[in-house]
Amino acid sequence: MKKTEELANRFREIILYGTWVANTNYKDQLENLNWKIATSNIDSLNTISILAQHVHYYTNGIKNVFNGGNLEIRDKYSFAFPEIKSQNEWKIFLTKFWEDAESLAKFIEKLPDEKLNQNFVDAKYGTYQRNIDGLIEHSYYHLGQIVLIKKIILTNK
């Protein structure tokens, strides 16, 4: 198996269907979650919906580069999203998240392995490998937060 195929599958694992590292994934945690729980505030913590949108923001931004576009994502905008106000809006967001994640995974697996060591957009951003690994690691970090926040909310209901 090519290294890029392995990376694509690692990315799918954290977002769409895996259980190897965290025994869960984003889709498992979010798919049947009520929007009111997803948008519930606990003290100064980010909401589950904000964390999910944050990870999607980076997924979509990196996907845009793979699709021939510019790197348009900026950290200062990575938590700035319109409020989700209904189950339908939550469902629409999740559908987009899953679609964009699968689309990025397909781009990653089609990369030649040699591309992994090349600069991602600009040398200051590191290599393709570093950015893909970073997205996977960043996603695990926030998945842990989501799991804990969800437990707190469901325990205090």
Image (tube, rainbow, N blue to C red):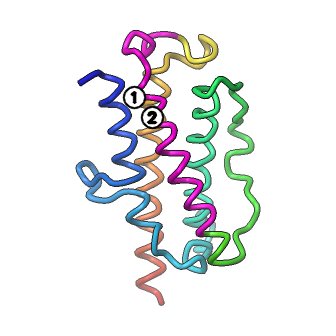
Classify 153 as above or below 157. above
Q: Position of residue 156 (x, y in %)?
A: 46, 87
Q: Residue furthest bottom?
A: 157
Label 2 packing within 10 angstroms: few (<14), some (14-19), many (20+) = some
- Give how far apart the Cα atoms at labels 1 and 2 are: 5 Å
Residue 53 falls in image quadrant: bottom right
Q: Position of residue 129 (x, y in %)?
A: 43, 21
Q: Position of residue 22 (x, y in %)?
A: 29, 54
Q: Amino acid at mark 1?
A: Glu
Answer with left or right where residue 123 lies relative to residue 82.
left
Whether residue 36 is in magenta: the answer is no
Quarter of the image that includes the N terminus: top left
Residue 109, disc: 1
Classify 57 as above or below 123. below
Residue 90 falls in image quadrant: bottom right
Label 2 sits on a secondary structure element that is helix
Answer with left or right where residue 65 lies relative to residue 145.
right
Residue 26 falls in image quadrant: bottom left
Residue for badge 2:
106
Q: Amino acid at mark 2?
A: Lys
Q: Residue at x 63, y 13 (%)?
A: 122
Q: Nearer the viewer, residue 62 or 49?
A: 62
Mark 1 near mark 2, Cβ–Cβ under 8 Å? yes
Answer with left or right where residue 71 lies relative to residue 56.
right
In the rendered structure, which segment of residues is drawn in magenta? 91-118
Label 1 sits on a secondary structure element that is helix
Label 1 packing within 10 angstroms: few (<14), some (14-19), many (20+) = some
Q: Residue at x 51, y 40 (%)?
A: 103
Q: Nearer the viewer, residue 75 or 73?
A: 73
Q: Main secondary structure of the magenta part?
A: helix
